[in-house]
Each structure stands twice: as structure tokens, then as C-alpha cells.
Image (spheres, rainbow, N blue to C red):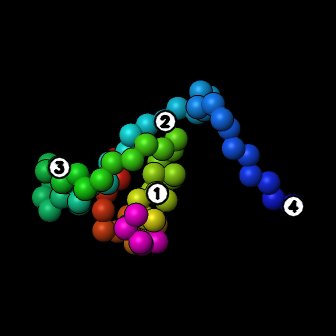
Amino acid sequence: MLTHLKFNKPNIIMKQDVYQLRTKPLHQGERGEVINKCTASSLTEAIIIFSKIKQLTPDELIKLFHVK
């Protein structure tokens, strides 16, 4: 049996970081353009969030974009 827990208080234990979805740069030394931002507790969670937004699989998202 699976259960889902929902906390009423903000999660103080897990640190939330801001991740950016960027275009892949064409030349070395360039920065990609920021497409979107999200707050997530890990890089994996951020990739999953961005893949849902872009309606791509996480593998396809990594091939096309850069997450930092």
C-alpha cells in the first residue's frame, strides 16, 4: 500500500535551490540563454520538473538543454 504524506509546514530539513534551464551554447566559453527557472531540492528533481514543463523525457531534455 502506497501512502502520500503532505506536510503543512515548509520543509526546513530539505534545502531548496534555484535551477535554470538554459540553451546549450554553440561555442565554448559562451553561456546559454535562460529559458526557465524552478526551485527544487536536487538536480534530479529539477530535471524532472523541466521535462514535464517541456513535455520531453529527461534524456531528451538533457540532449537539448543545459540545467544548472
User: Which mark lies nearer to you, 3 or 2?
Assistant: 2
First-in-chain label (3 vs 2): 2
Mark 2 sits on what residue? 16
Q: Which mark is residue 34?
A: none
SS at circle 1: helix
Where residue 56 appears, x then y in whole percent?
Answer: 42, 72
Identified at 74% across, 52% down, the residue is 4
Identified at 23% across, 60% down, the residue is 24
Verify whether residue 16 appears in magenta: no
What distance separates the C-alpha of mark 3 from that of mark 2? 24 Å
Locate residue 57 relative to residue 2 in the image: left or right. Answer: left
Identified at 81% across, 59% down, the residue is 2
- Amino acid under label 2? Gln
Mark 3 sits on what residue? 31
User: Which mark lies nearer to you, 3 or 1?
Assistant: 1
* Above/below status of 42 relative to 9: below
Disc 1 and disc 2 in contact, CB within 8 angstroms: no
Mark 4 sits on what residue? 1
Q: Main secondary structure of the magenta part?
A: loop
